[in-house]
Image: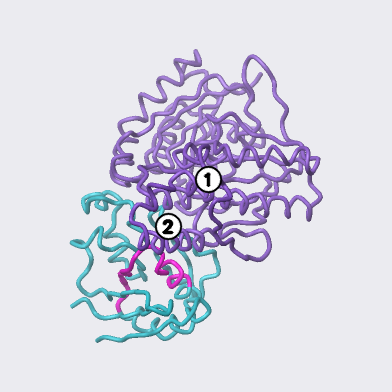
Amino acid sequence: MEHSFIIHSEKDVERVASEAVPFLKEHKVVAFYGDMGVGKTTFIKGVCKVLGVEDPVTSPSFAIVNEYEGNDNQVIFHFDFYRLKDVSEVFDMGYEDYFFSDHICLIEWPEKIASVLPDDRLDAYLSENEDGSRNLKIKSAV
Amino acid sequence: MNPIILGIESSCDDTSAAIIKGDIILSNVVAGQKVHEEYGGVVPELASRAHQQNIIPVVHKAMKDAGVKSGDVSAVAFTRGPGLMGSLLVGTSFAKGFALALDIPLIEVNHLQAHVLAHFIQEPDQKHEVPEFPFLCLLVSGGNSQIVLVHDFLHMEIIGQTIDDAAGEAFDKCAKVIGLPYPGGPLIDKLAQEGDPEAFEFSKPRIANFDYSFSGLKTSFLYFLRDNVKKDPDFIERHKNDLCASLQKTIVDILMDKLIAAAKKTGIKEIALAGGVSANSGLRQAFMEGEEKYGWNIYIPKFGYTTDNAAMIAITGLFKYQKKEFVGQEVAPFARMAL
């Protein structure tokens, strides 16, 4: 499975997010790849909005993980592993409890923990086009 | 007789213990974790391990410095959240064990509320002025940027907050982009002293109400550098001080604009600053100008009470002690806790 979307502007994020959400829900764990400033947090905000999250969705860079509640009391975990240097550092935070919880896990900077990412995840690649729009490509990891 | 409260803080990277008697601070011990600097941030595993190693020595030293024995302690207050789960667990478990062993009340404290109440910590030798209710508090740290309307010690509401990144995060991430080591905020402040704050202009967010946004600034800073480095590979090196000064001015302007608007809208002139970013000289200066420009009465706590510390947990514990707001042994830490 592989799909591509063009996000024309920040206002367009929610439209693309609503198209991508069914695929995200299927996989539960979603790894977002892309350079700093490309809009990973912004896209995740859009996804959370579509999922019915009412709390503010903010960058978890400091907290490492944020927890939100969406429609029908579904729990959404939002990670940012930007600060991690080594994969061994996620063991003590009990990452298994999150990744295998059957809740939706949206992960920024998954490169930092590549070896412990579940195989049945969805990979999402965000990149910037020449005209400033963004490209989103999603595909099953395996 | 004034109660003696032991405060415990372990929400993020520092382990801290403090003793207060009434509102007078007797000791405040913070064990920082040097380990995180070489990792470019707070590292969950290392953080919780270091807390486990630090907690007993830190409490021991706080009691010794205060000249207090465990039998003298009236209650123990601890940070329940928000913070890193692994780190919070260490302080919470210690506090529960301590309260159970001595059969004294256990008090849960919200870390954000404690940052605001740090203003009420008094020193043994001299009393200082404290804000009158209601007051506004601008709380800025690595993980927070919010404007809090404080009605009373235990009754406060957030009237504005960041919708994406915190101000401290904007400092630290932009610092990393220009090659400064962690934590970048203080270094930007230092280099900014030598630079021209008007050298470059970065876009400011247009956000409704009293909310903040720093994500766009981070992106525009990044793209601005990328475009200029294309033309001149040494651009960052040659303009480092001006970049820091201009970036700092932009962040401070964003913070102050909303605070000024909130003060106008509410008509409140008692204005306080809290959180670790209050150490930033640019922010302090802009904040202090409010005294003359807008007739504010301003309050800035001692630096040691603005970063993560247990003194603020202890003082919050005192106000809850007076109201008998205690919790039982079933209490568990909570990573995401609103005010």
State the image coordinates of residue A122 (x, y, percent, origin top left). Answer: 28, 76
Quickly name the residue at label 1: B245
Identify which residue is drawn at 50% across, 32% down.
B310
User: Under tag 2, what secondary structure?
Assistant: loop
Residue B187 sits in quarter? top left
Q: Amino acid at mark 2?
A: Pro
Which disc number belongs to residue B127? none
Left or right, residue B203 beside residue A140: right
Name the image quarter holding residue B312: top right
Three-letter code for the amino acid on which mark 1 is drawn: Ala
Q: Chain of mark 1?
A: B
Same chain, labels 2 and 1? no
Quadrant housing the N terminus of chain B: top right
Start-end of magenta stretch: A27-45
User: What colouring style does the render use?
Assistant: by chain
Q: Which residue is mark 2?
A: A60
Q: Position of residue B251 (x, y in %)?
A: 56, 51
Q: Nearer the viewer, residue B223 or B23?
A: B223
Q: Categorize mark 1 by other alpha carbons within 10 Å: few (<14), some (14-19), many (20+).
A: many
Chain B is which colour? purple
Please give the name of the residue rendered at 42% of the width and 43% of the height, measured from the top-left corner: B184
Is residue B109 covered in magenta? no
In this rendered view, identify the residue nearer to me: B151 or B235.
B235
Q: Which chain is cyan?
A: A
Q: Is residue B146 above or below residue B62?
A: below
Q: Secondary structure at mark 1?
A: helix
The quarter of the picture where residue A82 lies is bottom left
Labels 2 and 1 touching (C-beta < 8 A): no
Mark 2 Cα-neighbour bin, 10 Å: few <14, some 14–19, many ≥20: many
- Label 2 and label 1: CA atoms lie apart by 27 Å
Q: Which chain is indicated by disc 2?
A: A
